[in-house]
Image (cartoon, helix red, strand yellow):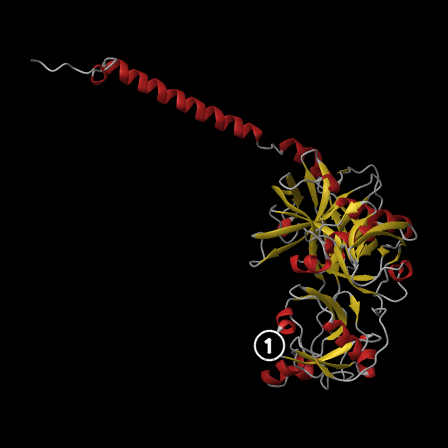
Amino acid sequence: MPKPSSVLSQPLVSYPVRRGLEALCLLSVMIVVLWSQSVSARELPDFTELVEDNSSAVVNISTSTTPKAQGSRFRGMPFDERQLEQLPEFFQDFFRGQQSPFGGAPNRQPRQSMGSGFIVSHDGYVLTNNHVVEGADEITVRLSDRRELPAKLVGTDPRSDVAVLKIEDGDDLPVVKIGRSQDLKVGEWVFAIGSPFGFDHTVTAGIVSAVGRSLPSENYVPFIQTDVAINPGNSGGPLFNLDGEVVGINSQIYTRSGGFMGVSFAIPVDDAMNVFRQIRDSGTVARGWLGVLIQEVSKDLADSFGLRRPRGALIAEVMQGSPAQEAGLQSGDIVLEYDGEEIQLSSDLPPMVGRTAVGESARLTVLRNGDEIDVDVTIGKLPEQGGNAQPDNQPESGSSSAAPLGMTVEPLPAEMADAIGVKGGVVVTQVGPGPAYRAGIRPRDVITEINRKPVSSVSDFKEVVESLPDGRAVSVRVIREGRASYLVMKP
């Protein structure tokens, strides 16, 4: 008997029809892919009109500096040039070269340097970097229409690396539009116009990689980090957003190669314009000053101070005579808010203070002994060379003692206290295996506080150590090489 055939085993359509359906499906997929690529291409920014609208206000800045004559310990060479030519070549090289005790032949050739800038007023004010024009004897500004105009230096602010120039006889010049750097978002498209390696009006683009970056060289500037290609010659040039507004001044790069293959940083235009207005109006720049040394709040420090998560700026030291001391701020306070703005990282605080006008009052929310309190501070003026950091500590007393934390302490010698500017505390003389070593405490560290309790003598040290809670991390305030910081000691 013939075996019944399965319906599923029979083709539903003929072979030619099936191939036609497959081709139709493939065509549909290709159309979808091409359409999506077209949409993606249309979503990418087009910089052509933005560049055309803004290039005329971006300038190339060239400087000339005549080297200063180097002094010599002799009044002059023992031979004139004609006599020198009669000597053997070896002696000629000796008396003319840099190794000559007579100073060698002076090199009076002017040094040339180049950078970028942008015009911010129709009468010719130009913003650029301080390092572009530092020490320059002559400054020339070249415009996009190839005009070369002399400029004078109005003033500089090395702290922010901003310089203000004035084009002589400037009249009805093109200007840039100034934006708001505080509105920048990470991931936002930006572009730069500058003169890398002397190639005028070169355009590069990228995105904002981060905002509010604090660099080791200056913590009063919350730098904008970008991946825009920046090279020597871009310094001082503008960073634009997609509205054609300047949001930063390209300032520096971190790179291993010396080229753009690195991380670019720009000065926020909000800070730059504040500097510009002060230099234009008064010739100097005044920044707000609180008078504290701060450090980051780590997870361990947050636990030891009773914070649910790491945040804020931990005050490690309060300078004597500072606005912070007059307001009653203390070492160990954690600043959580400044005038209503939350402090997430310790680097958030200095720019906020720096932007506050001298003499104005600011309200700080700080964590002290587990409680949040408000402290009003009248902001002072940041000293040019900084102040002597001298914490407000207790007097010293006591004798040497060995502690169960794996370290030995002794009274702080008077000469050492004077050298580092403290009044009280104990000095660590030996550190062995144990909690102190694991916390990072080392010999010659000065301890002034443990578990938020002051330590002004060896007897204080013993008393505090004996009362430490079991099994819980505690904070230890140490002064090392004149600088205070908090460490976390775990049992």
Q: How many marks?
A: 1
State the image quarter where residue 367 is shown.
bottom right
Regarding residue 342, the answer to whether it shows in the image is yes
Of the pair 132 and 177, the residue shown nearer to us: 177
Query: At x 23% / y 17%, what residue is drawn?
Result: 8
> Where does the image place residue 191, in percent across and percent down from the top left?
64, 41
Task: Tell me residue 305's x, y (percent).
Answer: 73, 59
User: What is the x, y in percent for residue 182?
Assistant: 75, 42
462 is higher (above) or lower (below) than 381: below
Looking at the image, which residue is at 65% across and 73% down? Answer: 436
- Looking at the picture, tell me which residue is in the foreground, 373 or 234: 373
Location of residue 137 (image quadrant): bottom right
Is 471 located above or below residue 409 in the figure?
A: above
Can you identify the residue that label 1 sits on? 433
Above or below for 310 versus 143: below
The residue located at (40%, 23%) in the rendering is 29
Left or right side of 94 for 334: right
In the rendered image, the residue lying farthest to the left is 1
- Residue type at mark 1 is Pro
* Residue 287, quarter of picture: bottom right
Residue 59 visible to the viewer: no
Q: Give residue 488's position: percent from left, percent from top.
A: 67, 65
- Which residue sits at x=62%, y=79%? 432
Position of the N terminus, as image quadrant, is top left
